[in-house]
Image (tube, rainbow, N blue to C red):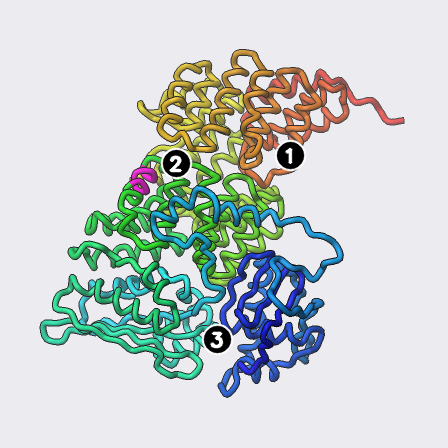
Amino acid sequence: MDVSVRAGKHYAFEAFVLDPARRTLTRAGEAVALTPTLFDTLLYLVEHPGQVVTRDQLLDAIWPSKTVDAANVSQTIFTLRRSLASAGAPEQLIATAPGAGYRFACPVEALSGKPPVGVSAQSSSPQRPSPRAWWVWAALLGPVAAVALAIGWPRHAPGPPTSNLVVLDGFQNLAHDPEFDQSLQMATQIDLQQSPYVQVLSAQRIADTLALMTLAPDTVLTPALSREICVRNNGAASIDGAVAKVGARYLLTLTATNCATGEIIAADKTEVDRRDDLLPALDRLVGRLRSRLGEPQDSIRQFQAPLLQRRTASLAALQAYSQGFYDFNHGKRIEAIPSYQRAITLDPSFSAAYADLAVVYNNLDQDDLAAAAITKAYALRDAAGAQQQLVISARYNTIVSGDIPEGLRIYRAWTQIYPNDSTAWTNLANKETWIGAYALAIEDGRRAFVLNPDSEGAYVVAARALLRAGRLDEAQAACAQAAAHHVDGDDLHGVLYDIAVARGDDIAAAAQLQWAAGKPGERTLLIAAGQEALARGQVQRGLDLFGRAAARGQSFGLGDIFSAPNARLLFDLGREDLARQHLAQVPAGYDSPDYRFALAEFGDAAQADALLAADVKKTPSNTLLTQVFAAEQHAAADLRRGQPTAAIEALRTAAPYEMRTLDIPYLRGQAYLAARDGVHAAAEFQKILANRGVEPVSEHYQLAHLGLARALRLTGDVAGSRKAYEAFFADWRGADPDMPLLAAARAEYAGLGAPKPRI
């Protein structure tokens, strides 16, 4: 672009620093990833603060001597706004002047000399360090350094400030061999994604762009069409490949074309004698292509592991993996299982297939299967590339070792090395949600779906964090944004179901169940509906729904995960008879936090403690196990023994993570009730009632009304107690008539006496 870059000059606005010479944008010392086009656009606006800049001015400045549609300016501004907002900028940083153009609506300070770190234009008042800054430094300086040394990550690991967005428009199968369908394109994509300098435009973004061009989303891409899609998305190059059979040999070609000019950036080819040599040859072609796209050689050497190390690697395995990958990323988790299993059968050393299968099992609460799959991937990780090693290490931490500080460091390192990888931000946000750090999760989740608007997981994680933070309208809007991008899936409808329950909207909840009817993902919604029915005191209906969910899962080879949790839930609902029946159905050798908790509730603390000791010995670094689940178990045993003060003390270690679910506040509230401390008990139950979004289908929300009624009765607040009882009765208006808890609550309510008439 023809924009003046003044040597030694840089610009500060808000908490951002823009350095034209180094072509970097930072916020509070952290790099903000922008494509070259977005950077140039921002620079032009910043150099003209407060002025209305027309679309023609931007076209001349950013795309000189190129034929670009004016609509591309609007799309560039839109994308720039999203990128800045995801980095913490105000929404109106770039204002629209209707009918005229755009205006940079923030004061800009032009500075000379070395750019300061974390300079803010609002220097009149000192700013507190961002909480996120601690996580960044922890990621860079903490124990992950040992992992970094093992696989060669840079210690400072910042990643490039911008990356080349490329359109991978297909891999022609001129050999007409069915094993080459999907597999070679997936291999090219995996190889490209190892690079911190290359970002591959997603298939859904391509489909969305085709829709904007009034073309069908499944339109076959031609080179000219790929270039136009690339330009509309501010991309750098379109890449196409081909494989052909030439006599007894195979010919591979790979070509990168400049989107804006149509010039060939790189064209390379190679011939191999055997099918088994195709993947190693493709690895080499992609490595040379990355170099032509401007990636430094030291980066290519560092982030270029062969796709599959063994020479007997199967293209059929890669084809099966491609199908599983596609299904999983389009919300079809159960359907992805057979494809991943086939990939593993064909190639038992396929670490990525094990790692992805582990995520599927983990999301379906198949803990043993998830642990076995990720443990196998972890054992094979040394053969993987740097990015895949990060993925495997992070998932192993989440599923097996459970060290939360270490896990956060790994995820943060992943986002630093690959700042344009939406999967990294999605996983970080999911981890933050899992520990109750909802504000951080919201920010990182939004960054994920801005980077990849076609990822169901990114929307789900962001919407779930918003829901848990009590921001229901924004959670609903995130789901609507997913629908606008034609993103759909089981988890998304699960979040929509939770939102409906949190709002008390039975019609909307029923609509989600109707959507799932007959689909493989129906199991997910049936589990949620079963929990919600039990929470309303509808035991038979809830157990019937769980039975349907179990049958649905068994048809896909998924085991029973309901007996132990239902035993705990039924105990809370006062149905100890049914709780004991479910506990007796737990198979021998089974272990889980819910199972141990139920054992403690029923007085078998010895068995519960033995199981806990074995788990702690196996994974002593598991943060939730040692600080939360153990605390809950000990508190349950103390309450069973009639020692509420000891139970309250046992729960202290869980305090940092207490709002990840409603379990800890509820258990603590019960302990305070047993200690006849109505004031503190009321505070715990009010905490639950103020945060229904944390677990909308949990029985603890309804039972918190009853707990609050009992707590206020202890304090002498009869009117408040009566009101809380009535709220409980309203929640349980459809409850089974034989519920002992309901009978007890009615007797207690009657004991309050009639309300005094108002004078």
Can residue 519 be spotted in the picture?
A: no
Residue 612 coordinates in the image, percent (x, y): 41, 23
Q: Amino acid at mark 1?
A: Leu
| Residue positioned 74% across, 20% down in the render | 715
Quarter of the view holding residue 294: bottom left
Front position among marks 2 and 3: 2
Q: Is residue 305 left or right of residue 549?
A: left
Residue 401 shows which numbered tag? 2
Residue that carries the numbered disc 3 in the rendered image? 232
- Badge 2: few (under 14), some or many (20 or more) residues near its Cα, within 10 Å? many
Q: Disc 2, disc 3: CB below 8 Å? A: no
| Alpha carbon separation for disc pair 2 and 3 | 44 Å
Q: Disc 1, disc 3: CB below 8 Å? A: no
| Residue positioned 15% across, 55% down in the render | 312
Instruction: Classify 208 as above or below 585.
Output: below
Residue that carries the numbered disc 1 in the rendered image? 689
